[in-house]
Each structure stands twice: as C-alpha cells, then as structure tokens.
C-alpha cells in the first residue's frame, strides 16, 4: 500500500485500535504489553476512566476559544503546577519542543530586559535531545538531526556531560543559561548525577546564568517525584514539561520563577492552540491522579521492583544486557546486540520498548503498572534475550 504520509518514520507494521491500562490491542486482535507508553506520554495508561471522563465532558461544552480570552481551567492548572513546584508562572503549549522554545526565548529575554542583549547563548550537553524545531535541534547539537537543514541556529554551545573544565571554559560574556535534562532519554537513559546538578546550580549562581531543566520526558511522576530534579534538591529557574502531563493529549508547559520570566510581557510570545479548554481539562485530570496521596510513592516502589527484576535478567543474559540505567519508571537497557533488533524481537514477544541512543532500549511503561505487569514484562524480556542468543549462536555455527 502506498501511503500519503511523509516517510519520516520507519513504522512497525502494527496498527493499534484500542487500549486499556498497560495493554494495547492491534487491529488483528493481538494484545501487546506497552512498556513504551507512546514514548513516556501515556503516563496513566490507555483509556484511563478519569481522563476519558474529563475529555468527553469538556468536548461536549467547549473545545477552543484562543488565548484572547480567559480560560478558567488553564488558570487552575497553572496554579496547581505553581503550587507543586518551584515556579511562579506557567505558559502552556502543545509539545515539549514548544515548551523548550519558550524556555529558550525566556532566558534570552531575561538578559535583554536586564540591559544585556549580548547574553543570548545557551550551553547544552552532548547527548541531549530538546526537540525537532530549528532552535531545539541546535540546542541538542546532534549532527544526525541537524544535517541537511541549513546552517545551525546560532546561540548554542555543547560541552561533554560531566566535564566541568570544558563547561567553565565555555562560559563567556555572551552566555545566558545552561540547559540540561536530569536524565537524558533519547541520549540513552543517562542519569546526570545529583552532585553534578548541584554544581550546575552553583555555577549559574556564580556567573549570573539561568538554569533550565528540560523535564519533557522525566517529569510528571516518571521517576517517583513529580519532577526528576527534585531528587537532587536543585531548583531551576525555568523548566519545560510535556509528554506525561497530557496523558496522551498534546500538552506542554514552560514553568518559571517570576524573576526568570520578567521579560515575557504581553505580546512577547504566544500560541494559537496552547492551553485550550480540551487540553486544560485533561491536564487537570492527570494531576488529579498523579498528585493523589500515595501515587508517586507507588511509582517509586514498582520502579524499584522492575529494576531488581531487570538486574536478575542481566545476570541470566550478560551478553545481551550489558547495563541497566535510569530511575523510577524511566529505565534503559544498554545492549550487546543492536537495540533495533532487540526492540523488534521484543515486539515478536508482544512487548513494546523504545530504542534510544548509545545502543539502549528504553522501558517507559505507564505509571499505573501493577506487579503482575512487571512480572509479565520481565518474562517477555527474558524470552526476547533468549531468542537473540539463539539467533547469535546459530549465526556463529
């Protein structure tokens, strides 16, 4: 079949038509255990009844008005996020890339209104992924995303993660901010040590820089705290979030202190769809669940269980699984086989995982998974590793 879609994705030959909890059902009726969650998006699984009710109820009343008018549920969601975080203000968008664009613009504007428009450069870290717009691919700095799209957008400098000598050398009179993911997702589930995040905060304070946390993938409970930076005790000036905050509905947000956002006055930034009534209804419903007593504790517990079971799996298959990375329910397997081969073999076992950089596959299940889901996933991962070992031994023979 010839598709009218732009061929920018190598799509697996499966089409899903419905889901429930951590499970998806394909059009042929086959059931798959979803440990990808739409790349950390379906934080509450599929067809969560509270989200379904919120969306359908709002859809029967009002979909869109634009930000030319007040949106009460947006005010409520913004206040709830402010109350739960370091932030004073929120700006709603449709995606993580848009939230990061807002963060980048906010950091530049902060210095411009402070009398230093020359301070526009942002230091980012090798292996980062901040989105697919021209600015955010420049921020990420990965050649495979930049190649062929003209000159790289100016204003971004990359340094190796953890190399503080290189970082200090990169800070200059034009530097405005540092931007980092607490755990690099696309980059291979590489956890930034808490002491490194604390050192970045100290550097920002010493040099008058803003600290931007990209929590698009790590946020909204993924690591067992509402946002991953909380584990380090570090407070950013600006933070982006998306993916899980909409539970599957397109939603992003840029959160900031009032000081960091001082330049973002009327007319300086905008969005047509961001923060519309449908998105705000779903975002509030997600917070209803994630902020409920015990929910985040449960994420931590099941994440620890999964990590322990994966460690046992690594012991059984050391040539396939070389390393286990991550925190909470954002885990990665560094592999001794191609990650794309592993993901395909897991799919044959009706388990969905997500390839990442550094030859890693990500395990990003819905935050509502049960102990039984963990046991089932590990069983299927075991079968996947065994199949790949058998294939490798057969090829060697």
Image: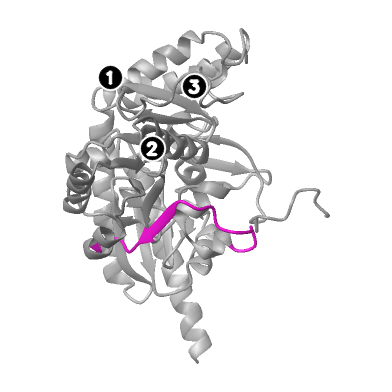
Residue drawn at (41%, 67%) of the image? 358
Quadrant that contains the N terminus: bottom right
Relative height, residue 80 to residue 362 (above, below): above
Q: Earlier in the sequence, mark 2 or mark 3?
A: 2
Residue drawn at (24%, 41%) of the image? 208
Q: Which mark is nearer the camera, 2 or 3?
A: 2
Tell me the residue that label 1 is attached to: 83
Report if residue 218 lies within the magenta region. Answer: no
Q: Which mark is nearer the camera, 2 or 1?
A: 2
Report if residue 153 lies within the magenta region. Answer: yes
Q: Earlier in the sequence, mark 2 or mark 1?
A: 1
Q: Which residue ends up furthest to the bottom in the rendered image?
A: 397
Tell me the residue that label 3 is attached to: 282
Residue 370 lies, in percent from the top left, at 34, 39
Residue drawn at (49%, 21%) of the image? 282
Residue 105 lies, in percent from the top left, at 46, 36
> Which dot marks residue 107?
2
Whole-number angstrom distance, CA of label 3 to CA of label 1: 18 Å
Helix, strand or loop: magenta stretch: loop
- The magenta region covers 147-163
């Amino acid at each position: 079949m010839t598709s009218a879609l732009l061929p920018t994705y190598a799509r697996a030959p499966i089409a899903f038509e419905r889901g429930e909890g951590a499970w998806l059902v394909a059009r042929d009726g086959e059931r798959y255990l979803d440990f990808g969650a739409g790349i950390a998006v379906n934080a509450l699984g599929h067809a969560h009844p509270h989200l379904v009710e919120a969306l359908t109820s709002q859809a029967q009343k009002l979909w869109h008005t634009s930000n030319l008018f007040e949106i009460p549920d947006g005010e409520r969601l913004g206040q709830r996020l402010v109350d739960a975080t370091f932030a004073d203000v929120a700006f709603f968008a449709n995606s993580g890339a848009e939230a990061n664009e807002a963060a980048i613009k906010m950091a530049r504007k902060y210095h411009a209104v402070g009398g230093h428009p020359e301070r526009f450069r942002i230091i980012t870290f090798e292996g980062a992924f901040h989105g697919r717009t021209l600015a955010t691919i420049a921020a990420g700095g990965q050649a495979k995303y930049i190649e062929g799209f003209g000159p790289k957008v100016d204003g971004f400098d990359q340094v190796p993660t953890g190399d503080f000598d290189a970082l200090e050398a990169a800070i200059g009179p034009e530097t405005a901010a540092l931007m980092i993911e607490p755990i690099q997702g696309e980059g291979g589930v590489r956890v930034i040590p808490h002491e490194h995040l604390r050192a970045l905060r100290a550097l920002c304070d010493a040099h008058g820089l803003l600290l931007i946390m990209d929590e698009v993938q790590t946020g909204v409970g993924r690591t067992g705290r509402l946002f991953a930076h909380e584990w380090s005790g570090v407070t950013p000036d600006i933070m982006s979030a998306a993916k899980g905050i909409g539970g599957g509905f397109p939603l992003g947000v840029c959160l900031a202190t009032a000081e960091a956002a001082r330049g973002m006055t009327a007319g300086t930034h905008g969005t047509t769809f961001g923060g519309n009534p449908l998105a705000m209804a779903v975002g509030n419903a997600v917070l209803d669940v994630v902020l409920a007593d015990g929910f985040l504790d449960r994420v931590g517990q099941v994440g620890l269980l999964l990590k322990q079971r994966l460690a046992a799996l690594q012991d059984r298959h050391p040539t396939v699984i070389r390393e286990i990375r991550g925190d909470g329910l954002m885990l990665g397997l560094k592999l001794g086989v191609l990650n794309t081969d592993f993901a395909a073999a897991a799919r044959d076992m009706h388990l969905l995982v997500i390839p990442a950089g550094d030859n890693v596959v990500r395990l990003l299940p819905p935050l509502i998974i049960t102990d039984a889901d963990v046991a089932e996933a590990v069983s299927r991962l075991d079968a996947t590793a065994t199949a790949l070992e058998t294939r490798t031994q057969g090829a060697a023979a």
